[in-house]
Image (spheres, grey):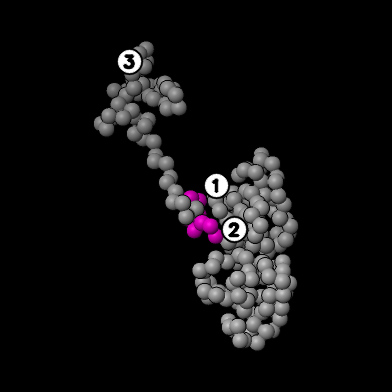
Amino acid sequence: MVVGVGLVLGALALPVSVGAQETGTPVETETGLPEAAAEKPPEKQCQPDVGCVTNLPLPRYVSLKGNEGNARRGPGLTHRIDWVFTRAGMPLKITAEFENWRRVEDQEGAGGWVHYSLLSGVRSVLVTLDMAELRDAPSEVATVVAQAEMGVIGRVQACNLDWCRVVLGGQGGWVQKAALWGVKPDEQID
């Protein structure tokens, strides 16, 4: 049987045989489905805790690459800008993916859709406790080597269950996870 033009019925395009153009009879395959439906590739199924685009876990933390990043209402340049992130290295949490766009939020929950090129996989943290203590070892009895004000951004070097080794303003040390935003409570980083 020769397949010719297709009829559009609803949202499904059905090919019809040349002789059946007047009646609109769909050509069926061996499965009993119209040929167009049988050839349609299956839609990608996404797991709720894995990004459909990158196959990386969701949510996950990243950082802002540059000094500025626009957060849009939706994934695309045609969507209006709702928020502008203005601190290089700022930790952000990715909660969704769509093509080249990532839905992110900051520590306060503000955010939107950001183009992936504005984000870095380099891990950073935000100090959430005023005068957080940096220690020379991951222990409450270890020597305090510095203190960090609330809002300081630092780079993560390692984390165990309760502590993270970070570099804040050139000073390295261990900070309790409870004083940081940008790492999951149970996350361990080598």
Residue beneath the point at 31% across and 30% down: 33
Residue beneath the point at 42% across and 46% down: 45
Which of 30/172 is in front?
A: 172
> Which residue carries the number 3 mark?
19
* Place of residue 44 in the rendered image (x, y in percent of width and height, measured from the top left): 43, 45
Few, some or many residues within 10 Å of mark 2 (<14, 14–19, 20+):
many
Q: Is residue 176 at all visible to an observer of this figure?
A: yes
Q: Amino acid at mark 3?
A: Gly
Whether pointer 2 and pointer 3 mark residues with C-beta atoms closer than 8 Å, the reply is no
**Mark 2 vs mark 1, CA separation in Å:** 15 Å
Asked if the magenta segment contains residue 54, the reply would be yes
Q: Which of marks 3 and 2 precedes in the sequence? A: 3
> Which residue carries the number 2 mark?
93
Left or right relative to 129: residue 48 = left
Residue beneath the point at 59% across and 50% down: 103
Q: Which residues are magenta?
A: 52-60
Q: Quadrant of the N terminus?
A: top left
Asked which quadrant contains residue 23, the reply is top left
Indicate the secondary structure of the residue bearing disc 1. Answer: strand
